[in-house]
Image: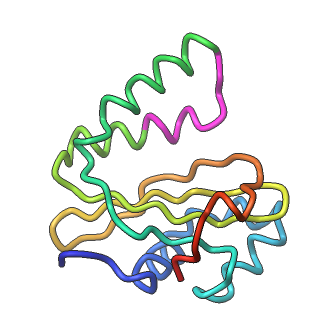
Amino acid sequence: MDSVSNGELFSAILSSNILTSYQSIDHELAVLLETPNHCNIHYPRNHVTAGQILTIFRQRLDFMLSSRIYLNLESTKQLIGFIEENMESQLYYVTFNCEKQHYDVCCGLTGEQLQVICVMTGGHIPDELFGESSQ
C-alpha cells in the first residue's frame, strides 16, 4: 500500500471510535462524521515519514512540559511513542474543522496496516489557511 485514500482514512477513524468522546460535547463534529466528503473535513494531500518529524515533536513536548501546557500533551506523547516504534511509517493528518474547535486525527501506515494514533485539538482554523480543497 503506497498511499491511503480519503475513504480509508475516514473509515479507520470511524471504526477506531477515537472521536466518540468529542462527539458528545460537539454536535457539529457528529454532523461531520456522517459523510466522508463533508467540506469541513480536510484530508492530507501527502504523507510525511514519521522519522522526519520526530525531533520536532520531541522539541514540542519539551516546550509543553517546561511551559506547563497540557492541551494535547498526552496526544503528543502517544505520537512520539508511535514514531519511535515505527520510524519508517507514513503519517497522515485528517482535520475535522468545526465552528469553534478543530480535531486533527493522526493516522500511521506501517506496512499494510493503518492505525489511528491520536487526536489533537485546537480552535477553529480559518478556511483560507487550508488552501484549495483536498477533497
Q: Nearer the viewer, residue 97 or 66?
A: 97
Q: Position of residue 85 (x, y in %)?
A: 21, 43
Position of residue 43 in the picture relative to residue 113 (left or right): right
Q: Position of residue 47 (x, y in %)?
A: 33, 62
Q: Is residue 71 magenta?
A: yes
Q: Residue at x 66, y 79 (%)?
A: 33
Chain part drawn in magenta: 68-77
Q: Is residue 37 magenta?
A: no
Q: Residue at x 26, y 75 (%)?
A: 3
Position of residue 45 in the picture relative to residue 38 (left or right): left
Q: Residue at x 74, y 70 (%)?
A: 29
Image quarter of residue 9: bottom left
In this picture, is 34 found above or below 49?
Answer: below
Q: Residue at x 31, y 45 (%)?
A: 82
Image quarter of residue 57: top left
Q: Residue furthest top?
A: 66
Position of residue 119 in the picture relative to residue 4 (left or right): right
